[in-house]
Amino acid sequence: MHCHIEAGPTRNEMMNWETMKQVMAIVRHMQPELVDITGGAPEMNPLLSKFVGALRKEGQNVQVRTNLTTLLESGMQEMIEFYKDQGVSLVASLPCYTEANVDLQRGKGVYEKSIKVLKRLNASGYGSDPNLKLNLVYNPGGAFLPPEQSQLESDYRKNLGKEHGIVFDNLLTITNIPIGRFGNWLRQENQYEEYKQLLKDSLTLRLWAG
């Protein structure tokens, strides 16, 4: 999910079971409302199912952030049913509701694959069963802020529903932080300082309005 901090298929860092046990100990002590698992792509860790299963066995609410396309990779055929059986909430990356914009941002063919997985999730109850939450995530594809969330969510519902029959619970919009890969891109495009000022101005306006 978090490409901006240099996550990608060429990285080999992987959370091991000892670290996961330490996380579970902290969770047991703090008793948070939700354990939110992100990546990279969490499904690429072969211990994810064991980790999620252990958390759910202890009664923890679990949410996994998925890039969707990983669920089409070899060996991932059972993950959707696993998520369903465990009652895991999903937050799925879909940076736009149009094919052109998604493929421009994430690579050719990503939109088609993402839609395929979303349809499988819907068929398993995600997006319609209140116990199987499916939230989508929009993030800007450049040096600009996300649109107003509720209006954009309406556009997502209208377009994904009409074109593909896809349903979901909520749309979440995120603002890109100028670090890692995104920060490097901003510098290459000579937009780094301008984008930082945009963030500062936006925060000042929100604080003033609030």
Image (tube, rainbow, N blue to C red):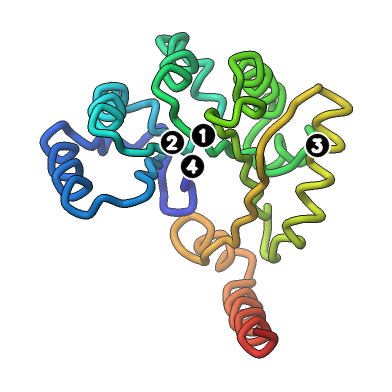
First reached walking from the N terminus: tag 3 or tag 4: 4
Q: Position of residue 106 (x, y in %)?
A: 63, 38
Q: Is residue 16 above or below residue 83?
A: below
Crowding at dot 2, Cα within 10 Å, few <14 / some 14-19 / many 20+, comes out as: many
Crowding at dot 1, Cα within 10 Å, few <14 / some 14-19 / many 20+, comes out as: many
Q: Which residue is mark 2?
A: 64
Q: Which residue is mark 3?
A: 98
The Cα atoms of the two marked residues, 3 and 2, are separated by 24 Å
The answer to whether the residue labelled 4 contacts the one labelled 1, judged by CB atoms less than 8 Å apart, is: no
Amino acid type at image mark 3? Thr
The Cα atoms of the two marked residues, 1 and 3, are separated by 21 Å
Q: Which residue is mark 4?
A: 1
Q: Secondary structure at mark 1?
A: strand
Amino acid type at image mark 1? Leu
Q: Which residue is mark 1?
A: 90
Q: Is residue 180 above or below residue 26?
A: below
Between label 4 and label 1, give the one nearer the viewer. Answer: 1
Q: Position of residue 17 (x, y in %)?
A: 15, 31
Q: Is residue 172 above or below residue 79?
A: below
Between label 3 and label 2, give the one nearer the viewer. Answer: 2
Q: Secondary structure at mark 4?
A: loop
Crowding at dot 4, Cα within 10 Å, few <14 / some 14-19 / many 20+, comes out as: some
Q: Residue at x 39, y 26 (%)?
A: 43
